[in-house]
Image: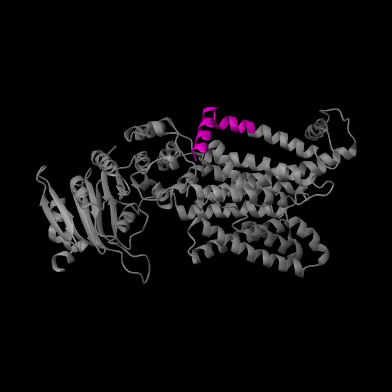
Amino acid sequence: MSAATLSVQDLSWSPGRGAGTLLRSTSFALEAGRVLGIVGPNGAGKTTLLRLLYRFHRPTTGTVRVDGDDIWALSARSVAQRIAAVLQEQPSDFALTVGEIVALGRTPHRRGFGGSTGSHDKDVIDDALDRLDLHGLGDRHLGTLSGGERQRVMVARALAQEPQLLILDEPTNHLDIRHQLEVLDLIRNLPLTIVTSLHDLNLAAGVCDDVLLIQSGQTAGFGPPDQVLSEAAVSDAFQVMARREQLSRSNTDHLTFHLQKQGTHT
Amino acid sequence: MSEITNRAQVSRKLGGMPAFLVGGVILLVISLSLAISVGAVPVPLGTVWGVILNKLSPGLVEETWSRSREAIVWEIRFPRALLATMVGAGLAMVGASLQAVTRNPLADPHLLGISSGGAFGAILALLHTGLFIGLLTVPLLAFAGALGTTFIVLGVSRFADATSADRLVLAGVAVSFIIMACANVLIFLADPKATHIVVFWMLGGLGLAQWGQLIYPLIILVACAAWLMWKAQDLNAVTVGDETASTLGIPVARFRLAVFVVGALITGVMVAFSGIIGFVGLMVPHVVRMLVGGDYARVLPGSALLGAVFLLWADITARTIMAPEDMPIGIVTGLVGGVFFVWLLGRRKSFG
């Protein structure tokens, strides 16, 4: 596994003529191996930005470069060999097993007829199953797994793609605390460049090297979490009263939130 | 659900796919022989294979049968059984592929109106336009009708924002009603003498099978089946979701369109030669998934085999249940398939 640099320049996107712009001239650069968290209120454009990064939407303006190459100058297949994504899509129940889903990750590397699996493919798939502790579940149907197990399957599938850049859309959604921590721990320790959207700002601050705060499609801050997630910026972006407090036992920063009303209303 | 899991695991332990394929081929050969043997005039199995082997390699077996028996086996029942095999295999593979690209377990060429479109095209050719490009007119217009209807259904489902599984089927059923009404107008406007045979064919009839025409469905079936098998992994990927499939390098929109065109091609040609035979595409892939799991590299050949066997038995039933009358085979598949459909709806309810 190796990591790639990601550079985004003047990226904007709107769904079509007459429709509003969902993302405006966004620029940032991410060094290889770093973890970027994308945070912002609902509808701010997090998912849109991710879709532009994994080449699902074609940008209205601007470019996305992975290791210096514009992803729209490359074929879909060669982008899929470098960028993998773990999305929130729920697979329909077509009786695929965990092993078969993870094997899908080899699709962009495959040549030849049907689903023939070479010995290298097998090694990569085994490695991905191992890394996510899924070996006992290889023959299980996806429909019979818990939410946390499914999420691990989808991450294993993405790792089987042998990407240099891994994109995750709300990987902790619907997971209980232990599984949230497990997924984030895994993400932090992968030797890949990682972009993930996260709802929980404190989790984001704990896991990410950099944070991109977006608000109504515009960048409200990019940089290390303690600088970007200031009380003022978070309060403004989320329309809440955010306070940065020190936890007394662990001596770490922690953001707390209140509705603005609370202070003024009687 | 766990029952399905267990069965899939058991079948995998037993050697899985090779065993299933060998068993399926044996079952197919047995069903094919019986389909030729059974009928108003019973022909012993030995005679069936004697005639066939002698035709393939003259003089191989000593002729102990009459000319009329030979004609029944070779001119009537064998081409009919082969057509049943191809129609069953084709429709089952179309159903399986449509279920993947629509992520809809209820997708079926009949329910989505594709068969009705094919019938409309075929009726147009048979009763109105005449065979202006020879024998190929009927399958070509059937393909055009099937493809046109596919696009209408997709358009309607987009217009009605019918992205969910059940609403896509409703869109298909609605369009199917409209197209069938138009097809009935075509029948009504035509020469009454010609309409009887068309009505019978429309309910599903393999009785018109002739050696000279079998080559067209065969070519289409082999070509389309090869393409679908080549794309088996992509079919697996789209069951996970459009965006995930596209991050795997699959051009999802174009791929789905290609599968719809291939589905219309197979359905159109099969409808042209056998009329509307419903529910094969709905039923067979579900049974196959229970036996061999969900990987399309196994679902597709499994569906082809089981679809062929199912249709051969449906045809045997249709020919014997009211012998010597030939009941339209569509009635048999409709009856079995309708009951299966109800069962499927009930089962889906239980796990969302």
Residue A33, by quadrant, is: top left
Assess whether residue B15 is covered by the magenta stretch. Answer: yes
Residue B53 % position (x, y): 78, 32
> For the image shown, how many numbered marks are present on the structure?
0
Left or right relative to A200: residue A135: right
Task: Inspect this view and state whether residue B174 appears.
Answer: yes
Image color mode: one colour
Residue at image position (62%, 62%) is: B176
Residue at image position (31%, 49%) is: A173
Quadrant of the snapshot with the N terminus of chain A: top left
Left or right relative to B41: residue A98: left
**Outermost residue to the front:** A266
Residue A20, by quadrant, is: bottom left
SS assignment for the magenta stretch, majority:
helix
Left or right relative to A179: residue A150: right
Q: Is residue A202 above or below residue B289?
A: below
Residue B239 % position (x, y): 47, 47
- Span highlighted in magenta in the image: B1-23
A41 or B207, which is in the foreground?
A41
Assess whether residue A180 is covered by the magenta stretch. Answer: no
Left or right relative to B329: residue A34: left
Residue B9 % position (x, y): 50, 32
A125 or B167, which is in the foreground?
B167
Residue B212 % position (x, y): 77, 47
Task: Inspect this view and state whether residue B148 appears.
Answer: no
Q: Is residue A142 above or below residue A22?
A: above
Quadrant of the snapshot with the C terminus of chain A: bottom left
